[in-house]
Amino acid sequence: MARDAEDTKRRLLQAAADEFAQRGIAGARVDRIAAAANANKALIYSYFGNKEDLFDAVFHALVVDTVHDVPIDADDLPGYAGRLFDRHLSHPEALRLAIWHSLERGGAALPDAVILADQGKVQAIAEAQERGVVSRRFPAGELMIMIVGLSILGSPVLVMTQTDNVEERRRTVTEAVRLLTEGDNS
Amino acid sequence: MARDAEDTKRRLLQAAADEFAQRGIAGARVDRIAAAANANKALIYSYFGNKEDLFDAVFHALVVDTVHDVPIDADDLPGYAGRLFDRHLSHPEALRLAIWHSLERGGAALPDAVILADQGKVQAIAEAQERGVVSRRFPAGELMIMIVGLSILGSPVLVMTQTDNVEERRRTVTEAVRLLTEGDNS
Protein backbone atom coordinates (compact mmCIF):
# COMPACT_ATOMS: atom_id res chain seq x y z
CA MET A 1 0.00 0.00 0.00
CA ALA A 2 2.74 2.47 0.91
CA ARG A 3 4.43 1.78 -2.39
CA ASP A 4 1.17 2.36 -4.25
CA ALA A 5 0.77 5.71 -2.51
CA GLU A 6 4.31 6.76 -3.47
CA ASP A 7 3.64 5.69 -7.04
CA THR A 8 0.42 7.70 -7.18
CA LYS A 9 2.14 10.77 -5.73
CA ARG A 10 4.87 10.48 -8.33
CA ARG A 11 2.33 10.23 -11.17
CA LEU A 12 0.41 13.21 -9.78
CA LEU A 13 3.57 15.36 -9.56
CA GLN A 14 4.49 14.48 -13.14
CA ALA A 15 1.00 15.24 -14.44
CA ALA A 16 0.94 18.48 -12.44
CA ALA A 17 4.35 19.51 -13.82
CA ASP A 18 3.04 19.09 -17.36
CA GLU A 19 -0.20 20.95 -16.65
CA PHE A 20 1.40 23.88 -14.79
CA ALA A 21 4.21 24.18 -17.33
CA GLN A 22 1.69 24.48 -20.13
CA ARG A 23 -1.02 26.61 -18.52
CA GLY A 24 0.40 28.32 -15.45
CA ILE A 25 -1.26 28.47 -12.05
CA ALA A 26 -4.53 30.23 -12.93
CA GLY A 27 -4.99 28.19 -16.10
CA ALA A 28 -4.24 24.77 -14.59
CA ARG A 29 -7.15 22.46 -13.76
CA VAL A 30 -6.91 19.97 -10.91
CA ASP A 31 -9.45 17.78 -12.74
CA ARG A 32 -7.13 17.47 -15.71
CA ILE A 33 -4.14 16.64 -13.51
CA ALA A 34 -6.08 13.88 -11.73
CA ALA A 35 -7.28 12.44 -15.04
CA ALA A 36 -3.80 12.52 -16.60
CA ALA A 37 -2.37 10.77 -13.53
CA ASN A 38 -5.23 8.26 -13.55
CA ALA A 39 -5.91 9.14 -9.92
CA ASN A 40 -8.77 10.38 -7.82
CA LYS A 41 -8.94 14.17 -7.55
CA ALA A 42 -9.55 13.91 -3.79
CA LEU A 43 -6.09 12.38 -3.43
CA ILE A 44 -4.51 15.62 -4.66
CA TYR A 45 -6.09 17.57 -1.83
CA SER A 46 -5.22 14.83 0.62
CA TYR A 47 -1.57 14.58 -0.46
CA PHE A 48 -0.71 18.15 -1.40
CA GLY A 49 -3.46 20.60 -0.34
CA ASN A 50 -4.94 23.12 -2.76
CA LYS A 51 -3.83 23.97 -6.29
CA GLU A 52 -1.29 26.56 -5.09
CA ASP A 53 0.22 24.04 -2.67
CA LEU A 54 0.45 21.51 -5.48
CA PHE A 55 2.26 24.08 -7.65
CA ASP A 56 4.75 24.69 -4.84
CA ALA A 57 5.31 20.93 -4.44
CA VAL A 58 5.98 20.53 -8.17
CA PHE A 59 8.28 23.56 -8.32
CA HIS A 60 10.19 22.30 -5.27
CA ALA A 61 10.61 18.83 -6.81
CA LEU A 62 11.87 20.23 -10.13
CA VAL A 63 14.44 22.45 -8.40
CA VAL A 64 15.69 19.56 -6.28
CA ASP A 65 15.97 17.38 -9.41
CA THR A 66 17.88 20.07 -11.30
CA VAL A 67 20.39 20.66 -8.50
CA HIS A 68 20.84 16.89 -8.19
CA ASP A 69 21.33 16.30 -11.91
CA VAL A 70 23.38 19.45 -12.62
CA PRO A 71 25.44 20.18 -9.50
CA ILE A 72 27.54 23.32 -9.54
CA ASP A 73 31.26 22.88 -10.27
CA ALA A 74 32.87 26.16 -9.27
CA ASP A 75 36.24 24.94 -10.60
CA ASP A 76 34.72 24.80 -14.09
CA LEU A 77 31.98 27.41 -14.33
CA PRO A 78 31.96 27.47 -18.16
CA GLY A 79 31.32 23.70 -18.14
CA TYR A 80 28.63 24.15 -15.50
CA ALA A 81 26.94 26.84 -17.62
CA GLY A 82 27.02 24.49 -20.62
CA ARG A 83 25.36 21.71 -18.62
CA LEU A 84 22.68 24.11 -17.33
CA PHE A 85 22.13 25.21 -20.93
CA ASP A 86 21.64 21.57 -21.96
CA ARG A 87 19.28 21.04 -19.04
CA HIS A 88 17.02 23.92 -20.08
CA LEU A 89 16.80 22.42 -23.55
CA SER A 90 15.98 18.89 -22.37
CA HIS A 91 13.79 19.88 -19.39
CA PRO A 92 12.03 23.17 -20.17
CA GLU A 93 9.38 22.65 -17.47
CA ALA A 94 11.50 23.99 -14.59
CA LEU A 95 12.09 27.34 -16.32
CA ARG A 96 8.46 27.59 -17.41
CA LEU A 97 7.32 27.05 -13.81
CA ALA A 98 9.76 29.66 -12.53
CA ILE A 99 8.46 32.17 -15.06
CA TRP A 100 4.78 31.45 -14.44
CA HIS A 101 5.51 31.87 -10.73
CA SER A 102 7.05 35.29 -11.38
CA LEU A 103 4.24 36.53 -13.60
CA GLU A 104 1.32 35.16 -11.63
CA ARG A 105 2.52 35.65 -8.07
CA GLY A 106 4.21 39.00 -8.60
CA GLY A 107 6.53 39.80 -5.76
CA ALA A 108 6.01 36.53 -3.90
CA ALA A 109 9.16 34.99 -2.47
CA LEU A 110 10.71 32.01 -4.22
CA PRO A 111 10.26 28.58 -2.61
CA ASP A 112 12.81 27.76 0.10
CA ALA A 113 14.31 25.06 -2.13
CA VAL A 114 15.20 27.67 -4.77
CA ILE A 115 16.68 30.07 -2.23
CA LEU A 116 18.74 27.32 -0.63
CA ALA A 117 19.95 26.08 -4.02
CA ASP A 118 21.02 29.60 -4.98
CA GLN A 119 22.82 30.12 -1.65
CA GLY A 120 24.74 26.90 -2.21
CA LYS A 121 25.84 28.09 -5.67
CA VAL A 122 26.94 31.49 -4.38
CA GLN A 123 28.93 29.87 -1.57
CA ALA A 124 30.70 27.50 -3.97
CA ILE A 125 31.63 30.41 -6.26
CA ALA A 126 32.84 32.53 -3.32
CA GLU A 127 35.08 29.68 -2.16
CA ALA A 128 36.52 29.30 -5.66
CA GLN A 129 37.22 33.03 -5.65
CA GLU A 130 39.08 32.70 -2.34
CA ARG A 131 41.13 29.87 -3.81
CA GLY A 132 41.99 32.10 -6.77
CA VAL A 133 40.31 29.79 -9.31
CA VAL A 134 37.63 32.33 -10.23
CA SER A 135 38.11 36.06 -10.82
CA ARG A 136 37.04 38.40 -8.03
CA ARG A 137 36.00 41.01 -10.55
CA PHE A 138 32.32 40.39 -9.74
CA PRO A 139 30.79 39.50 -6.35
CA ALA A 140 29.93 35.78 -6.17
CA GLY A 141 26.19 36.47 -6.10
CA GLU A 142 26.42 38.58 -9.23
CA LEU A 143 28.40 35.87 -11.05
CA MET A 144 25.80 33.28 -10.07
CA ILE A 145 22.96 35.41 -11.46
CA MET A 146 24.84 35.98 -14.73
CA ILE A 147 25.65 32.29 -15.18
CA VAL A 148 22.05 31.28 -14.53
CA GLY A 149 20.82 34.08 -16.79
CA LEU A 150 23.18 33.26 -19.66
CA SER A 151 22.33 29.55 -19.45
CA ILE A 152 18.71 30.20 -20.37
CA LEU A 153 19.65 31.98 -23.62
CA GLY A 154 18.69 29.34 -26.13
CA SER A 155 15.82 27.82 -24.18
CA PRO A 156 12.71 27.53 -26.34
CA VAL A 157 10.66 28.78 -23.37
CA LEU A 158 11.34 32.44 -24.17
CA VAL A 159 10.74 33.24 -27.83
CA MET A 160 13.20 36.12 -27.76
CA THR A 161 16.13 33.88 -26.81
CA GLN A 162 15.40 30.99 -29.17
CA THR A 163 17.97 30.12 -31.78
CA ASP A 164 18.19 27.94 -34.86
CA ASN A 165 21.82 27.21 -34.06
CA VAL A 166 21.96 25.54 -30.67
CA GLU A 167 25.63 24.59 -30.97
CA GLU A 168 26.66 28.17 -31.69
CA ARG A 169 24.58 29.44 -28.76
CA ARG A 170 26.11 26.85 -26.43
CA ARG A 171 29.59 28.05 -27.43
CA THR A 172 28.47 31.65 -26.83
CA VAL A 173 27.26 30.84 -23.31
CA THR A 174 30.31 28.86 -22.21
CA GLU A 175 32.76 31.32 -23.78
CA ALA A 176 30.97 34.26 -22.15
CA VAL A 177 31.15 32.59 -18.74
CA ARG A 178 34.84 31.89 -19.33
CA LEU A 179 35.50 35.57 -20.05
CA LEU A 180 33.51 36.69 -17.01
CA THR A 181 35.15 34.28 -14.57
CA GLU A 182 38.75 33.84 -15.71
CA GLY A 183 41.69 35.41 -13.88
CA ASP A 184 41.81 39.18 -13.66
CA ASN A 185 44.27 40.97 -15.88
CA SER A 186 43.53 44.30 -14.25
CA MET B 1 -13.47 64.28 -34.05
CA ALA B 2 -10.28 62.79 -35.47
CA ARG B 3 -8.37 64.08 -32.48
CA ASP B 4 -10.93 62.53 -30.14
CA ALA B 5 -10.51 59.18 -31.90
CA GLU B 6 -6.72 59.33 -31.55
CA ASP B 7 -7.09 60.22 -27.90
CA THR B 8 -9.45 57.30 -27.28
CA LYS B 9 -7.09 54.90 -29.08
CA ARG B 10 -4.21 56.11 -26.94
CA ARG B 11 -6.22 55.61 -23.74
CA LEU B 12 -7.29 52.13 -24.87
CA LEU B 13 -3.69 51.11 -25.66
CA GLN B 14 -2.52 52.34 -22.26
CA ALA B 15 -5.32 50.52 -20.43
CA ALA B 16 -4.68 47.39 -22.49
CA ALA B 17 -0.94 47.53 -21.71
CA ASP B 18 -1.72 47.61 -17.99
CA GLU B 19 -4.27 44.80 -18.20
CA PHE B 20 -2.14 42.47 -20.39
CA ALA B 21 1.00 43.15 -18.35
CA GLN B 22 -0.81 42.15 -15.17
CA ARG B 23 -2.93 39.22 -16.38
CA GLY B 24 -1.56 37.95 -19.67
CA ILE B 25 -3.61 37.19 -22.77
CA ALA B 26 -5.95 34.51 -21.41
CA GLY B 27 -6.53 36.38 -18.16
CA ALA B 28 -7.15 39.82 -19.69
CA ARG B 29 -10.74 41.08 -19.96
CA VAL B 30 -11.78 43.43 -22.74
CA ASP B 31 -14.55 44.75 -20.46
CA ARG B 32 -11.99 45.85 -17.91
CA ILE B 33 -9.82 47.53 -20.55
CA ALA B 34 -12.81 49.50 -21.90
CA ALA B 35 -13.85 50.57 -18.41
CA ALA B 36 -10.33 51.64 -17.45
CA ALA B 37 -10.05 53.68 -20.66
CA ASN B 38 -13.50 55.15 -20.10
CA ALA B 39 -14.45 54.00 -23.60
CA ASN B 40 -17.07 51.84 -25.24
CA LYS B 41 -16.07 48.20 -25.60
CA ALA B 42 -17.32 48.14 -29.19
CA LEU B 43 -14.63 50.70 -30.07
CA ILE B 44 -11.93 48.16 -29.19
CA TYR B 45 -13.23 45.73 -31.79
CA SER B 46 -13.69 48.52 -34.27
CA TYR B 47 -10.20 49.95 -33.80
CA PHE B 48 -8.10 46.87 -33.10
CA GLY B 49 -10.05 43.64 -33.76
CA ASN B 50 -10.26 40.84 -31.19
CA LYS B 51 -8.37 40.49 -27.90
CA GLU B 52 -5.38 38.81 -29.59
CA ASP B 53 -5.15 41.61 -32.15
CA LEU B 54 -5.28 44.16 -29.34
CA PHE B 55 -2.43 42.36 -27.57
CA ASP B 56 -0.36 42.51 -30.77
CA ALA B 57 -1.09 46.23 -31.16
CA VAL B 58 0.01 46.92 -27.57
CA PHE B 59 3.15 44.79 -27.88
CA HIS B 60 4.03 46.53 -31.15
CA ALA B 61 3.55 49.99 -29.61
CA LEU B 62 5.72 49.15 -26.57
CA VAL B 63 8.54 47.83 -28.75
CA VAL B 64 8.44 50.91 -30.97
CA ASP B 65 8.52 53.14 -27.87
CA THR B 66 11.47 51.24 -26.39
CA VAL B 67 13.55 51.43 -29.57
CA HIS B 68 12.72 55.13 -29.85
CA ASP B 69 13.58 55.95 -26.24
CA VAL B 70 16.62 53.63 -25.98
CA PRO B 71 18.27 53.51 -29.40
CA ILE B 72 21.26 51.23 -29.80
CA ASP B 73 24.69 52.84 -29.66
CA ALA B 74 27.09 50.22 -31.00
CA ASP B 75 30.05 52.47 -30.20
CA ASP B 76 29.16 52.22 -26.51
CA LEU B 77 27.47 48.88 -25.90
CA PRO B 78 28.09 48.91 -22.12
CA GLY B 79 26.30 52.27 -21.94
CA TYR B 80 23.48 50.92 -24.11
CA ALA B 81 23.11 47.88 -21.83
CA GLY B 82 22.94 50.21 -18.83
CA ARG B 83 20.17 52.28 -20.43
CA LEU B 84 18.22 49.12 -21.34
CA PHE B 85 18.65 47.98 -17.72
CA ASP B 86 17.19 51.31 -16.53
CA ARG B 87 14.34 50.96 -19.01
CA HIS B 88 13.33 47.54 -17.70
CA LEU B 89 13.21 49.01 -14.20
CA SER B 90 11.13 52.05 -15.14
CA HIS B 91 8.92 50.33 -17.76
CA PRO B 92 8.45 46.67 -16.78
CA GLU B 93 5.37 46.24 -19.00
CA ALA B 94 7.31 45.57 -22.23
CA LEU B 95 9.20 42.65 -20.70
CA ARG B 96 6.08 41.29 -19.04
CA LEU B 97 4.25 41.32 -22.39
CA ALA B 98 7.15 39.59 -24.14
CA ILE B 99 7.15 36.87 -21.49
CA TRP B 100 3.38 36.37 -21.48
CA HIS B 101 3.60 36.09 -25.27
CA SER B 102 6.22 33.34 -24.96
CA LEU B 103 4.36 31.35 -22.35
CA GLU B 104 0.87 31.66 -23.77
CA ARG B 105 1.60 31.49 -27.48
CA GLY B 106 4.34 28.89 -27.33
CA GLY B 107 6.29 28.81 -30.54
CA ALA B 108 4.46 31.69 -32.18
CA ALA B 109 6.65 34.12 -34.08
CA LEU B 110 7.43 37.48 -32.54
CA PRO B 111 5.65 40.54 -33.94
CA ASP B 112 7.33 42.07 -37.01
CA ALA B 113 8.23 45.17 -34.98
CA VAL B 114 10.31 43.05 -32.61
CA ILE B 115 12.06 41.17 -35.41
CA LEU B 116 12.84 44.40 -37.25
CA ALA B 117 14.13 46.04 -34.08
CA ASP B 118 16.40 43.06 -33.40
CA GLN B 119 17.70 43.07 -36.98
CA GLY B 120 18.57 46.74 -36.65
CA LYS B 121 20.54 46.05 -33.47
CA VAL B 122 22.45 43.16 -35.01
CA GLN B 123 23.34 45.24 -38.05
CA ALA B 124 24.62 48.12 -35.90
CA ILE B 125 26.79 45.71 -33.88
CA ALA B 126 28.12 44.03 -37.03
CA GLU B 127 29.12 47.40 -38.47
CA ALA B 128 30.90 48.31 -35.23
CA GLN B 129 32.75 44.99 -35.47
CA GLU B 130 33.83 45.80 -39.01
CA ARG B 131 35.09 49.19 -37.83
CA GLY B 132 37.09 47.44 -35.11
CA VAL B 133 35.20 49.13 -32.26
CA VAL B 134 33.65 45.89 -31.00
CA SER B 135 35.38 42.54 -30.60
CA ARG B 136 34.66 39.87 -33.23
CA ARG B 137 34.94 37.15 -30.63
CA PHE B 138 31.17 36.56 -30.84
CA PRO B 139 28.92 36.83 -33.90
CA ALA B 140 26.91 40.08 -33.85
CA GLY B 141 23.61 38.23 -33.32
CA GLU B 142 25.01 36.39 -30.31
CA LEU B 143 26.29 39.62 -28.79
CA MET B 144 22.88 41.23 -29.26
CA ILE B 145 21.13 38.35 -27.48
CA MET B 146 23.59 38.49 -24.59
CA ILE B 147 23.25 42.25 -24.17
CA VAL B 148 19.46 42.04 -24.19
CA GLY B 149 19.57 39.05 -21.83
CA LEU B 150 21.98 40.66 -19.37
CA SER B 151 19.98 43.90 -19.36
CA ILE B 152 16.95 42.16 -17.86
CA LEU B 153 18.92 40.85 -14.86
CA GLY B 154 17.59 43.11 -12.16
CA SER B 155 14.12 43.59 -13.57
CA PRO B 156 11.47 42.95 -10.93
CA VAL B 157 9.47 41.01 -13.55
CA LEU B 158 11.40 37.79 -12.97
CA VAL B 159 11.67 36.95 -9.27
CA MET B 160 14.89 35.01 -9.80
CA THR B 161 16.76 38.02 -11.16
CA GLN B 162 15.54 40.60 -8.64
CA THR B 163 18.09 42.31 -6.47
CA ASP B 164 18.11 44.52 -3.40
CA ASN B 165 21.15 46.34 -4.77
CA VAL B 166 20.19 47.88 -8.10
CA GLU B 167 23.35 49.97 -8.37
CA GLU B 168 25.57 46.92 -7.93
CA ARG B 169 23.55 44.98 -10.52
CA ARG B 170 23.79 47.85 -13.00
CA ARG B 171 27.57 47.85 -12.61
CA THR B 172 27.57 44.08 -13.12
CA VAL B 173 25.61 44.36 -16.37
CA THR B 174 27.65 47.18 -17.89
CA GLU B 175 30.99 45.67 -16.82
CA ALA B 176 29.99 42.25 -18.22
CA VAL B 177 29.07 43.82 -21.56
CA ARG B 178 32.39 45.68 -21.56
CA LEU B 179 34.28 42.40 -21.05
CA LEU B 180 32.28 40.63 -23.77
CA THR B 181 32.67 43.37 -26.36
CA GLU B 182 36.07 44.96 -25.79
CA GLY B 183 39.00 44.38 -28.14
CA ASP B 184 40.28 40.82 -28.49
CA ASN B 185 43.49 39.97 -26.72
CA SER B 186 43.56 36.52 -28.24
Image: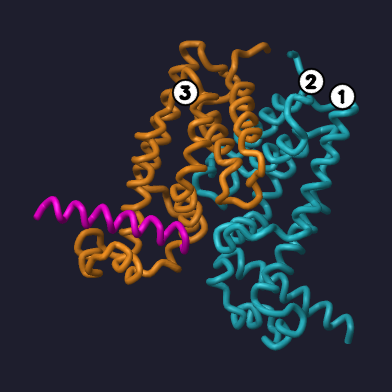
Chain colours: A cyan, B orange
Quadrant position of residue A101: bottom right
Return the residue nearer the eye: A177 or A110.
Answer: A110
Amino acid beneath label 1: Gly
Q: Is residue B104 magenta?
A: no
Say which element carries label 3.
Answer: helix
Residue at image location 48% in from the left, 57% down from the top: B100
Residue at image location 20% in from the left, 53% down from the top: B7
Q: Position of residue B96 (x, y in %)?
A: 49, 52
Q: What stretch is highlighted in magenta?
A: B1-23
Residue at image location 49% in from the left, 27% down from the top: B80
Give left or right: position of B95 versus B40. Answer: right
Say which element carries label 2.
Answer: loop
Tell me the residue that label 1 is attached to: A132
Q: Are marks 1 and 2 in contact (CB under 8 Å)?
A: yes
Give left or right: position of B155 versus B109. Answer: right
Tell me the residue that label 2 is attached to: A183
Chain for mark 2?
A
Q: Position of residue B22 (x, y in %)?
A: 47, 60
Q: How crowded is mark 2: few (under 14 residues within 10 Å), some or many (20 or more)?
A: some
| Res. B125 mark | 3
- Please state the total of marks drawn on the protein image: 3
Q: How far apart are marks 1 and 3 (CA)?
A: 34 Å
Q: Does the magenta stretch include residue B2?
A: yes
Chain for mark 3?
B
Chain for mark 1?
A
Q: Distance between the residues labelled 3 and 2?
A: 27 Å
